[in-house]
Amino acid sequence: MPTTVMTERIAVRSPQKSPAVRASFPVKAREQEQVPEPVVEMRAIRKTFLDVVANERVNFSLRPGEICALLGENGAGKTTLMNILFGYYAADEGEILIHGKKVSFASPRDAIACRIGMVHQHFTLVPSQTVLENVVVGSSGGRFFLDMKRAREKLCALQKRFGLAVDPDAPVWTLPIGGQQKVEILKALYRDARILILDEPTAVLAPLETRELFDTLRTLAAEGCSIVFISHKLYEVMEIAHRVVVLAKGVICAERSVSETDERELANLMVGHELAGKTATARKAGAALLSVSRLTVRNDKGLDAVKDLSLDVHSGEVVGLAGVSGNGQMELADALFGLRVPTSGTIVLDGAALPDGNPKSRVDRHMGRIPEDRMTTGLMLDLSVEDNLVMEHHGDFRRSGMLDREAIGDHAEGLMCDFGIKADGRRAPARTLSGGNLQKIILARELSADPKVVVAAQPTRGLDVGAIEYVHGRILEARDRGAATLLISEDLDEIFALSDRIAVLYEGRIMGIADRKYATKEQIGLWMSGIRDVLCA
Amino acid sequence: MDHILSATFLTGLLAAMMRMATPIIFGTLGEILSERAGVLNLGIEGIMLMGAMSGFLTTLHTGSLWLGVAAAALSGVLLALLMALLTVTLGLSQHVSGLGITLFSTGLAMFIYRLSVGSPVNPPTVTPFTQVALPALSSIPILGEAFFTQYALVYVAFLLIPVLWVLLYRTTWGLAIRTVGENPFAADTVGISVPLVRTLCLAAGGALMGVGGAFLTLAHQNMFLIDVVGGRGWISIAMVIFGNWDPVRGAAGALIFGLLDAFQLRLQALGVDLPFHLFLALPYVLTVVALVGVSRKSSAPAALLKPYRREEKG
């Protein structure tokens, strides 16, 4: 591949749109405004879950051939609104019109019949089945026997037309995330979708894959498909969308044509207040507190997921480990946390080797662990906030062999106050807290003990902008107190915001390490795609 | 020991293998169908006993063996629908519901049997199915007599193996069933009704389990005893795992079990000086051993045991 093309293709995250893109759409938009009949009209939609209002008086419309971005923070009601359009939820009030005709959807089946397709954030695929099986399921049109030959022809035609290359016979679990997403899109197109909803499609993609996805979406829109693109990433919205609808707290708070707005305005609309810029002032790094050397770890399938990996993290620095999901992040984190026994290699914390597969040694040696999945690994959702807060240290809260509830309570009150954990009392089950507050429990537990080493895996995944700011602040604070911090993240913005050095994990190996001051997103993006030093030597 | 190698011995052994395997094949296929849709039906032991009882009583009162089989299938369907109500509609624990159904059906089967025939000294009997020799095939030496001179229900069981395989892997329904069992959310988003598929699979599976039970009282034996099923339901569940949720491999497991069962009967008859309980235990012990080896590599349907609701936040 020629270098020049690479540069252009990789510049996904750059906020400036290429002139070609900017010019091409408005012409088309104006054409369509003369034929104003929207393909979708949602009127006065209201949806509540128990007593939480998810959508309130939402009016939403979509025009043919348009890419409309639905922008908002987590919990703003974007996904709910689109799940209503897809027939997955029933709205409490309001009506939906497709091509001007009122419809009522009892299930996704009805929505599919109206040629609506949705790619959910969490893919709806069966990993053990092939691509073809995943695409075909449920679309038989009343036939009893599977006609795989016909299905294959139809699928291949679609693949050719929209440039969505995946092997129809590959089991889905063997595909990278980007490939799985293509299967999801093909699934919708196979059902002749003309209205395509994508729920945070880029959240799991590498820059190159995002590029490909955007090319596909443009092709689809050019063929007259209408696309709803749910996102909370502003630069993406600016690049791909023609129109932006901003949702906040279940209500539509603004609607803009992309040509008439900018990232700054959208950010303020979305959050409702000005965002403080994150500052990660680099400090002088000290001694290596965490040294991983020649570590090899197997995944659940028995294959090497981390291969001969060596990495040092020094006191007072954040090393950001970037990479597309599935490149060994989970296995590396598990090995560091002591949840997975490596096949070879050592992990040394402050001069002494940590025993393999022994989580307690990590607690004893002051490693702060922020696990990837706070719901299952990090917390016990059915236990109270206070119990979760002492989970690793309940030995310290003992009086004559019994738990000292009073001391536990005091400890919890203190941390809840320090970390601003909002809960219905310290005895409230963790399950009742929001995602941001759950993560605060983990931060409080792991960072209040003044850890020497902090390993944070995807610490802000699924959190809204406010909570992300808070988590970032706390991580930097720990660093400033001298902790050696390893930040494993798939979010490049996060990596760049927090790290002093940036390493890239690709297929279980470190592709490269760069000082943040000299690193560019293009360079890191190339490494993440497994391309070493094409541009910058 | 010489006659172990004789042709008569071999024919007898293989024929017994087929007979011993048949109820387990019915049970295994029924259970595979349920589990492929995501529901573990631990009611199988009780459903087989109800099938054995209702098949027997129906034949006793009407004189028709096939009506008995139909009644057994019907009782299986009804109990499986109860299971569907508990686990699919209400989303209760599949373990507790299934065991509950087994306990319930065991009591109910005995109760109805007592109500119907009282407690006579000699339990009533029916004229059971007779073996049907298939033309041409049954005259193959050794094997013909073993495989093709069997009860009609044996042929049905063996025919059902490829039928279920084709259903699961070659039809749109099968793909829908497998998708429901692997990822019900995916099925829902392409417009497949998860509760409907699960309920139908449970019902059809229950029918097979009921017929498996009826084979025991209408062909294998000619009377109903409370322990007539004797753990064959549980063995079927083990065979599902042994066969990695595949009908052909599951049935192969059932055949191996049948062979061991037939073999231990013959070992007992040889008069080896060991307690007969040891021989009785042999197939079960070997099943456990086989499972230890196989189940490490097996992969259950991903959504097995998981009730499905459209996710509602709250």
Image (cartoon, coloured by chain):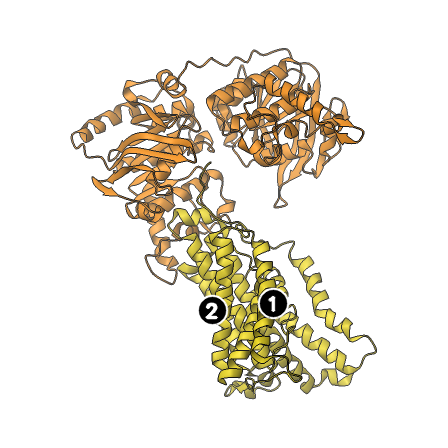
> Does dot 1 land on a helix, a strand or a loop?
helix
Q: Which one is nearer the viewer's eye here, A55 or A131?
A: A55
**Residue A240 image offset from top left, x and y in percent:** 34, 28
Q: Chain of mark 2?
A: B
**Residue A486 image offset from top left, x and y in percent:** 62, 24
Q: Is residue A459 visible?
A: no
Q: Chain of mark 1?
A: B
Distance CA(mark 1)–CA(mark 2): 33 Å
Q: Is residue A221 visible?
A: yes
> In the image, is A128 to the left or to the right of A78?
right
Location of the N terminus of chain B (image quadrant):
bottom right
Specify few, some or many for label 2: CA neighbours under 10 Å numbering under 14, 14-19, or 20 or more. few
Colour for chain A in the figure: orange
Q: Residue at x 58, y 74 (%)?
A: B22
Residue B107 numbered tag: 1
Residue B264 vs A462, above or below: the answer is below
> Does dot 2 land on a helix, a strand or a loop?
helix
**Residue A232 image offset from top left, x and y in percent:** 41, 26
Residue B163 numbered tag: 2
Instruction: State the yellow chain.
Output: B
